[in-house]
Image (cartoon, rainbow, N blue to C red):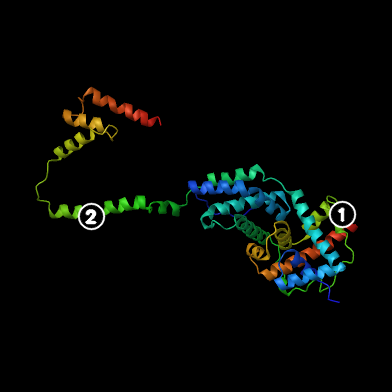
Amino acid sequence: MMQHLTNPQLIDYIHGALAPEEDASVHAHLESCALCREEYATEVALTELLRKQAALEERDMPSTVKAAIWQQIRDARPSPATRILAWLRPAIAIPVAAAIVLAAYFGLHSQQASAAPTIDAAYLLQDHAAMNSTVPFGDRSGADAAELQSGSSGSADETAVNVQPAIYTADAGR
Amino acid sequence: MGVPRKPIEPPTPEQAAFLERAVEQYGKATYNFAYRLTRNEADARDLTQDAFIRVYRAWRSFQPGTSFLSWIYRIVTNLHRDELRRSKGRYQEEIPDDNAPQEYAGERPLAVTPIEDYVEGQLSEPLARSLEALSPDQRQVVMLADIEEYSYQEIAEIMGCSIGTVRSRLHRARALLRRLLQKQIQQ
């Protein structure tokens, strides 16, 4: 008569955790041994009881848990390290680096060529204003042009001046 | 649970969406897992909350295609263990189970067991009390093996121990559970 199965063997068998050969021999033994079958049935019954118990105890997650999770996240503030890292993002870091390089280059260049002839600053401003005035939503488009074209800040053309506040109001209202 | 919390960063849209979906799909399972582990609603609430905050923080380390549930169960397990360690006395490291003497040693612990004879419901209270009497590790291995139906390998990963430990822990937990249940029924 073959030795009876142990409970650990039965438990591993129920959980499909035996090596194939042992699984097969346990299976064969259960076929032929009523005593072990009875013990096997008890172990299976325990598993079933546990599952029924779990189903009985199952509950929904209280809504307060979800609310508390989101509250904790809403209260989150970026740490100093993150704020510093934010400045290192490519979108910010690359233009900043480029500006520094350009400033260094032109700073150096202007020192070396300080005696070179320069274009009149007023001409550049007027040119810039004229270009901007063709861009309807450009930054300070009409007003700059009007201001510069009239030669002084006080007596600007009525229509050009009135366009600006309307645009700013629309922006502020968004 | 009085766990000191590290500062949390505000969410990116992807992170917020990830968390929203995780809570929606796995909140209930996680809460029930935490409840079965702690046998206590207040602790289960705290544990669930802390677990999802950890998911939120570590969301990028989740690998798509792997089981989210296993991941969050592991998180809950670790948080629970940390919490028990903090509240000293409630948790003691078990003797390495692999070296522990087997309860059965090849013999039957009970000649006759009434488990099968009881109908559903009658055993609910005794079983609940018996489960409470198990150690947290024993309770957890039973939950994962018998209720969640994880393999020993998966349980070892969730609990952070060897398969041998899972095996012997489960054997001992079930043997103890049967004895406790028997005692409860006879009372």
**Foreground residue among A2 and A67:** A2
Please identify the quadrant where the N terminus of chain A is shown.
bottom right
Q: Residue at image x 52%, y 58%?
A: B61
Q: In the rendered image, which residue does mark 2 sit on?
A: A104
Q: Residue under mark 1: which chain is it in?
A: B
User: Would you identify the image quadrant in which residue A67 lies?
Assistant: top right
Q: Residue at image x 61%, y 53%?
A: B51
Q: Residue A41 at what x, y percent from top left?
A: 83, 62
**Foreground residue among A36 and A149:** A36
Q: Residue under mark 2: which chain is it in?
A: A
Secondary structure beneath disc 2?
A: helix
Q: Residue at image x 68%, y 63%?
A: B151
Identify the amino acid type marked 2. Answer: Ala
**Foreground residue among B55 and B14:** B14
Identify the amino acid type marked 1. Answer: Tyr
Q: Residue B135 at what x, y percent from top left?
A: 74, 62
Q: Residue A80 at what x, y percent from top left?
A: 45, 52
User: Would you identify the image quadrant in which residue A16 lies?
Assistant: bottom right
Horizontal side of B67 relative to B91 (left or right) equals: left
Secondary structure beneath disc 1?
A: loop
User: How many angstroms separate mark 1 from mark 2 (CA)?
Assistant: 88 Å
Q: In the rendered image, which residue does mark 1 sit on?
A: B118
